[in-house]
Amino acid sequence: MPGLKTIYSKDGTPITDIKASVIRSSLLNEVGEAVFFMSTASTKCRREVLEYGNFLYIQNDSLPDWVGVIDTPRVWHHGYVEVHAFEPQFLLAYRLAPLNGIIEGTPGEKFTDLLAVANGREDTLIRAGNVFTGGISSQETMTGSVGEHIKKIRENAKHDWILTPNIDAAGRLTIIMDWLEKAGVLTDLELSQGQNILYGDTPLEESGELINSIQAVSDVTGGTQTVTTYQDDTARSTNGLREVRQSLSGTSEVTALTSNTKQIIDLQKSASLSTPLTAVNVGSTFANIRIGNIVKYKYTDVGFDGDVLGMTQFVRIEGYRFDESNGTCELFTGKVV
């Protein structure tokens, strides 16, 4: 069901509510986007409201609330304007880390330090929330943007981040960014075509590069490269040897390299299941659609369960795209590790 939309200024002050049907997406560890249209005859169609850098906050009865930053493109049509907004972590790509500065600690500790650096340059309204500080400590040299380093740290550790809009008692907007060992929970939701999933032409595609052995090489500059190999013997015996050499940045410690390599192989030792699922809000369907959540989906007459055709599979919600105009939610799913 369409919900209230509010525009906030760059400092989190509410400007005005707007009426618009929005298509918006959220993606696991990536930047989602929203698009809406406004008549040029509307009293709200003015620069103060639609200025680049303003925040669009969307509320919903069942799906998580959404927040994004208005940015280009802004497309002017005959009689209306098309406005785009992007989830706030994209701002971190425009905050430079100190050139050749050193950060060290666990992935979560580095994230907290880097977020402080970003807000020290100019406030992004993003605040560190629930931060998982476990994992292996390492040291790295900063050369790029805060966003670039946070993304690299996350990819190496295979952790997750989740952003949630927050309105305080004074009515001001901030965004809480959680750094999690693994986002989402196992739910009781079952997805089934013809019930809460619309029928699709291709219910399942198995794809992706199969890798079961990695020789990891550190790319730490100014020191000796460290080389270590991790292999999944079970996957190798099933599919044959699929080995690659991969450069991993940020550490030369064997323990950290091995841990990072194992997580990569766990994701790539079997095919990825691409399932184009378009959900409708039957029962508690939308209440369980959260980034990272694990749901059950029954594939009829596709895929293999052992040697039998057809399977029931747990899938992880890695993204969704909600279209308010027709009430459908397209799900992007991935494997459960």
Image (tube, rainbow, N blue to C red):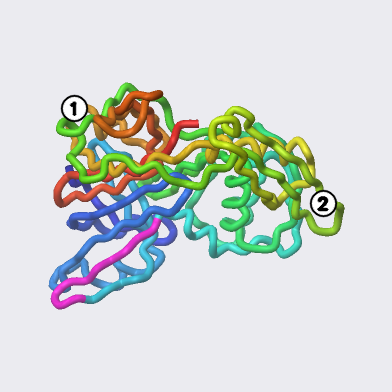
Q: Position of residue 78 (x, y in %)?
A: 15, 77
- Image point (81%, 47%), residue name: 226
- Identity, as a three-letter code, of the amino acid under mark 2: Gln
- Image point (73%, 40%), residue name: 229
Residue at the extreme top: 188
**Left or right for 29, reference 138:** left
Reading the image, the residue beneath label 1 is: 283
Marks 2 and 1 in Cβ contact (< 8 Å): no
In the rendered image, the vertical position of residue 56 relative to residue 293, given as above or below: below
The tag earlier along the polypeptide, 2 or 1, is 2
Residue 237 or residue 124, whichever sits in front = 237
Instruction: State whether residue 169 appears in this view.
Output: no
Q: Secondary structure at mark 2?
A: loop
Q: Position of residue 321 (x, y in %)?
A: 29, 48
Residue 83 belongs to the span the image colors magenta: yes
Residue 174 or residue 177, whichever sits in front = 177
Residue 58 belongs to the span the image colors magenta: no
Which residues are the magenta region? 77-86
Q: Position of residue 27 (x, y in %)?
A: 40, 47
Instruction: State whether residue 117 appears in this view.
Output: yes
Per the picture, the main secondary structure of the magenta-coloured stretch is strand
Q: In which image quadrant can residue 97 be found?
A: bottom right
Reading the image, the residue beneath label 2 is: 225
- Identity, as a three-letter code, of the amino acid under mark 1: Gly
Q: Residues within 10 Å of mark 2 (few under 14, many from 20)?
A: few
Residue 5 or residue 185, whichever sits in front = 185
